[in-house]
Image (cartoon, rainbow, N blue to C red):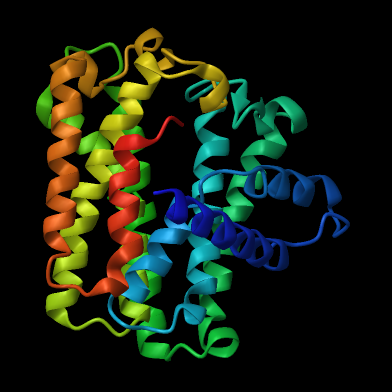
Amino acid sequence: MKDFLQEWASVLSEIEQILEQVLPSADTYPQVLHKAMRYSTLGGGKRLRALLVMGACAAVGGDVRQTAGLAAAVEMIHAYSLIHDDLPCMDDDDFRRGKPSNHIVYGEAIAVLAGDALLTEAFAELARLPEKYGVSPEVTVRVVGELASGAGSRGMVGGQAVDILSADGAPDEETLRYIHSHKTGSLFRAALRGGALLGGANQEELEMITRYAEYFGLAFQITDDILDEVGDAEQLGKPTRSDQRSGKQTYPRLYGLEQSRQMAEECVEHCLGALERFSERARLLRELAVFVLQRSH
């Protein structure tokens, strides 16, 4: 795991450089909007979604250099979702990644617009896949479709809507699974399937990557729920027990901490099982699945 973390740090640097180049510069008019976009997108983070794009491409034997545009796009969409999640009308969080949330620094109106702009810029970058990264138009269209579905009303946004609408309600397994598989899992799924498509995956490979994605997303969100209960606020970069205070549907609330941990472990086992037919090229995906259980933030 130590070697993997060192490798991860190296790839993180590459992803930061990609995002730095893709985002409008801070001195582009209107400057405050572009500063707000960069503030949240370049504000650190695990870059997990970009890594999943790259890992899926590598697993099916593709050229990882062709994933840069999608890697940037999924991270911009993730950043936009966090900006909006933190707003007073949503989760009302003042801190993200250990620093003030976007709306605390730039105001609510600019924060909303920064999120909107990041979402739009993500798809602008995908439109450049053929000219910038040599991706065929046919594959580009499929990748755009995957990300649009994963981020939209039947994906991430839909999950967020149900999360808000079900707050303070009685814990319900069906609702909880819907929230987690859509609010968090859908963007993971889009990243993984998009990366696999860029790598030239065949139908069988795509199905196995999709299976991995479903269990990875669930394992990640279960551990996220656990960390909100027992994690360290300083390491997480945001207050803990916020889900409990807002009456959110979570796995610990429904199943308790011990059973939730067991469920996360089972999900990771399913992740690894989905990769059994892949070679050593799937090492990044295997390591990321194991990391989910060990992470502290």
Q: Position of residue 90 (x, y in %)?
A: 48, 25
Q: Position of residue 113 (x, y in %)?
A: 66, 44
Q: Residue furthest top?
A: 245
Residue drawn at x 57%, y 71% is 125
Residue drawn at x 27%, y 46% is 217
**Left or right of 290, for residue 171:** left
Q: Quadrant of residue 170?
A: top left
Is residue 240 visible to us here? yes
Front-most of 236 and 181?
236
Where 86 falls versus 252 (above or below)?
below
Is residue 158 visible to us here? no
Residue drawn at x 35%, y 30% is 224
Q: Position of residue 165 (x, y in %)?
A: 30, 24
Where 37 falls versus 246 (above or below)?
below
Q: Residue furthest front?
A: 2
Residue drawn at x 15%, y 67% is 208
**Left or right of 193, for residue 20:** right
**Left or right of 290, for residue 259:** left
